[in-house]
Image (cartoon, helix red, strand yellow):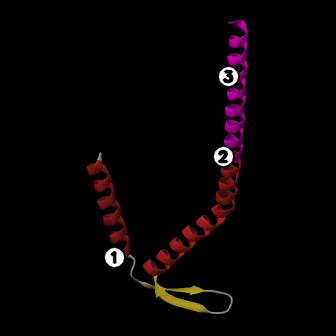
Amino acid sequence: MKWISRLGSVLLFVVFFTLAIKNTQEIELRFFLGEIHSPLVLLLLVFFVAGCALGLISMLPAFFRNKWEISQKNRRIAALEQENAAHESSRMTVETRENADVA
């Protein structure tokens, strides 16, 4: 299985390396305030990285909300476990007293 992963990685590298070699021509990207002259492959890389960063930033609120909910639920579980332990110990005490009264 590990060799399949490595083979996939090598194939992706070859595809992206070929893309970089074939797209070295200079292009002009026009904005409202100006323009940029840069190789196509560099602009593709910049916009890919910017898209990944924006995607990660957009996931942050959900990540922290889920983390907060998990901590709340863990606290609730701990409280219920303590309550259950107290209930079990009091039940054992009552059973011990009933057994002592019967004997």
Q: Is disc 1 surrounded by few (<14), some (14 to 19) or many (20+) residues within 10 Å? A: few
Indicate which disc residue 92 carries: 3
Say what amino acid the circle numbered 1 marks. Answer: Ile
Say what amino acid the circle numbered 2 marks. Answer: Asn
Separation of disc 2 and disc 3 at Cα? 27 Å
Q: Which residue is mark 1?
A: 21
Q: In what quadrant of the picture does the N terminus appear?
A: top left
Contact between labelled residues 2 and 1, with CB atoms less than 8 Å apart: no
Q: Which residue is mark 2?
A: 74
Disc 2 element: helix
First in sequence, mark 1 or 3: give its number. Answer: 1
Quarter of the figure with residue 20: bottom left
Separation of disc 1 and disc 3 at Cα? 77 Å
Quarter of the figure with residue 79: top right
First in sequence, mark 1 or 2: give its number. Answer: 1
Q: Is residue 89 magenta?
A: yes
Residue 26 position (above or below residue 52): below
Magenta-tinted stretch: 74-103
Contact between labelled residues 3 and 1, with CB atoms less than 8 Å apart: no
First in sequence, mark 2 or 3: give its number. Answer: 2
Closest to the camera, between mark 1 and mark 2, is 2
